Amino acid sequence: MKLPGDLDAAVAAWMAAHGRGGLAASAQQLSASYRKGESSSQVNLAAYVASRLPATFKANVDVQQALAAASPGFAPRTLLDIGAGPGVATWAAVQAWATIAKVTQCEQDKNFATLAAELNAASGFTTLIEAEIILKSEAILPPDISADLVTVSYMLAEMPLEHMAQIATRLWARARQVLVVIEPGTPEGFSRLRTVREALLKQGAFVVAPCTHPNTCPMIAKDWCHFKTRVQRSREHMHAKQATVPFEDEAFSYLVLSRNPAIQTGARMVAPVIVSKPGVSLRLCDASGLRDVTVASRDKPTYKRAKKTAWGHVWE
């Protein structure tokens, strides 16, 4: 997965200086704490950069692409990345939106903030080189900080679910136009996003993605809305994960909300496409709820289109 600008070289240089020994054990420990939703403070930064950064960046790229598809007129001038870590969500946003002229990154961990500053300086992007980094937690951000686009990537898992509605309100207050929230693709991550969605729809927010409707979420029981993106592993990534295959699939859940209506057409594909000789099976979610559709192979044009579509895409 190629990073934008000079960030591949910047990350490689940082790893050469800091990534000595013990990566595999640290990466396993990091993955375990990540799955439990534990705090990212005091993690081994080298293990994070080697094992989590590529997948987190790819998930952010996919979400920004979904936003662009549903809001073709969106052209943010300012970006606020809350819980920025080393800046992964910022990179995806700057790559997606050439209109961004001002970046503010908020991070509560000093080590992550320092890493973000080093990578910004070597990124080759003027907007990143000039980015403002605020070393404070989201809860104590000054009330006058806001931006056209606000990103909150893999941060809510560290916060209590019972406080999620109040947290959502505070995050929404920061977004002049669009709020993007990404969480691990687990039932717990989706539960947090469902709460955020319910709270902010009541406050007049419009759903941009993944939902193509503002109705009550139809996911119930053991079902949860999540998607997967494939990441090509670097040598360091494979070593850190002790992996034998050159790729991994990152499961993520996400929510994009806007102060303006977005294009709301079609149905989101919320499960892998199943191709068989009789036809293609699609699991869809739209205003009518969840439904399973089979496109028969005898319907050649539609069957061909269905085979080429993918989990997470919009079907029309």
Image: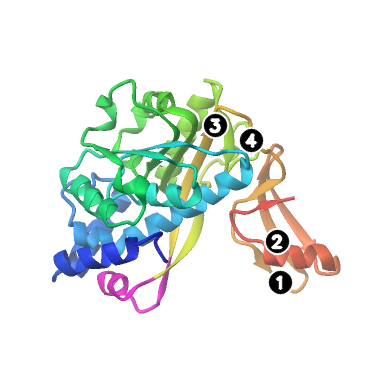
Of callouts 2 and 1, the N-terminal one: 1
Going from the N terminus, do you reach mark 3 or mark 1 first? 3
Q: Amino acid at mark 4?
A: Ala
Q: Are marks 3 and 4 in contact (CB under 8 Å)?
A: yes
237 above or below 165? Answer: below
User: Quadrant location of residue 278?
Assistant: bottom right
The residue under label 4 is 262
Pointers 4 and 2 in contact (C-beta within 8 Å): no
The percent coordinates of residue 167 (x first, y second) are: 36, 27
Secondary structure of residue under mark 2:
strand
**First-in-chain label (4 vs 1):** 4
| Residue drawn where x is 65% and y is 40% of the image | 212
Circle 4 sits in a helix, a strand or a loop, which is it? Answer: loop
Question: For the magenta stretch, what is the residue range?
Answer: 233-248
In the image, what residue type sits under mark 3?
Ser
Residue at image mark 3: 258
Please give the label number shown on residue 276. 1
Badge 2 density bin: few <14, some 14–19, many ≥20, Cα 10 Å: many
